[in-house]
Amino acid sequence: MNLEQRIESFVQLGDFFSQFTSNGINKKDDSEFNTLFFDAFKMQINRASEFNGWFTLNNVLNAFESWSEALSAENLAKWTANYNFSNNVDEKSIAIIMAGNIPLVGFHDFLSVLISGHKAIVKQSSNDKHFLPLILKFLEHQNANFKGKVIFTEGKLEKFDAVIATGSNNTARYFEHYFGKYPSIIRKNRNSVAILTGNESKDELENLGEDIFQYFGLGCRSVSKIFIPEDYNFDLLFNALYKYNNIINYKKYENNYDYNKAIYIMSLFNVLENGFVMLKEDESYASPIATLFYEKYKSVDDLMLKLNSKKDQIQCVVSNLDANKFVKFGKTQYPNLWDYADNVDTLEFLLNI
């Protein structure tokens, strides 16, 4: 199976995913795969919240829609054109340890290993373990050469040549201990931030709400902190974010909001809140659910020096200051295939093992 065939398989997968979007589930009449797979995917998507209470229907559909858009023929061709696949002669077995904080969060590693021509030994998170086996069955049906390319395991990882592991700062220490002798990519905790100047439009601030609230803020690309000028008018932000006020009606989110609010009150912290999100001045980057940290800055130049010194804690930066440097408002959860987690080029790693 050559690169072109692998790309075509994922293009077909992306087209199949396009039936599951934030606007709902809409079955196509002309999909050759629907007889075998549509009902199975629909059932699993509708049941996702039974296995993980944070996996609401809307969040799962957002994830499928995002991947549907990413897996276009144009995107896959543009992504793979940057690498020399002719060097990849020997098929290797790559162990992937996946996170489960948002739906399909491990799919990019899964895709990268298969598109590079390797085999995957996948240890899924118990929080997100039902979609990838279905996706593999789709790929095996689309191209039988995928059979035997992926093994899912819940036991000890064995007989692998390299490792891609994603976890917390604590688990990363264990990963480094156990897998230190292998070629590896080991990812730790990261969060995303936004730089506000006070000159943002209402549309931009509303789009920032997507970066904050999508997936309940649980993703590494979720904005957990904003940097604001010293004279910032919070009314601008609160007014724009109000369109997301229904998030408080989700019980798990509400429970976190109430718990964290109680902690802040008892600790005598000065917190701004509007009934569904709290703003707390804090130098940390990882904020609790239903809380957005903020920090004031005096100059953009000084702020950029600060962010550069903390780059190992930051996944992406949102701002309208420079389109070439920063992610646009509302786009953090829609990365390109070449926007690698922790800025580590996964495909380059895989092609040079």
Image: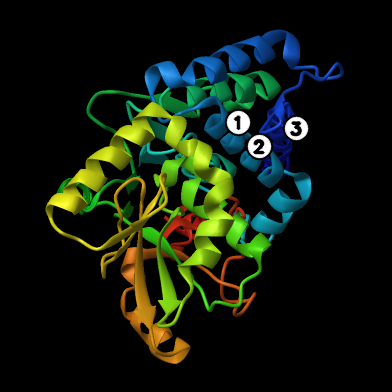
> Closer to the N terminus: mark 3 or mark 1?
3
Query: What number is the disc on residue 65?
Result: 2
Specify the quadrant of the image occupied by residue 269.
bottom left
Would you name the residue on which mark 1 appears? Answer: 61
Query: Can the viewer see residue 94 in this picture?
Result: yes
Residue type at the position of mark 1: Leu
Q: CA distance from mark 3 to mark 1?
A: 14 Å
Residue 253: image x %, image y %? 37, 35
| In the rendered image, the vertical position of residue 316 relative to residue 274, given as above or below | below
Looking at the picture, tell me which residue is in the foreground, 38 or 273: 273
Number of residues whose C-alpha sits closer than 10 Å to that of mark 1, classed few (under 14), some (14–19) or many (20 or more)? many
> Quadrant location of the N terminus?
top right
Q: Quadrant of the C terminus?
A: bottom left
Q: Are marks 2 and 3 in contact (CB under 8 Å)?
A: no
Residue at 25 percent of width and 48 percent of height: 168
Residue 16 drawn above or below residue 8: above
Q: Earlier in the sequence, mark 2 or mark 3?
A: 3
Q: In the image, which disc is placed on residue 15?
A: 3
Element carrying mark 2: helix
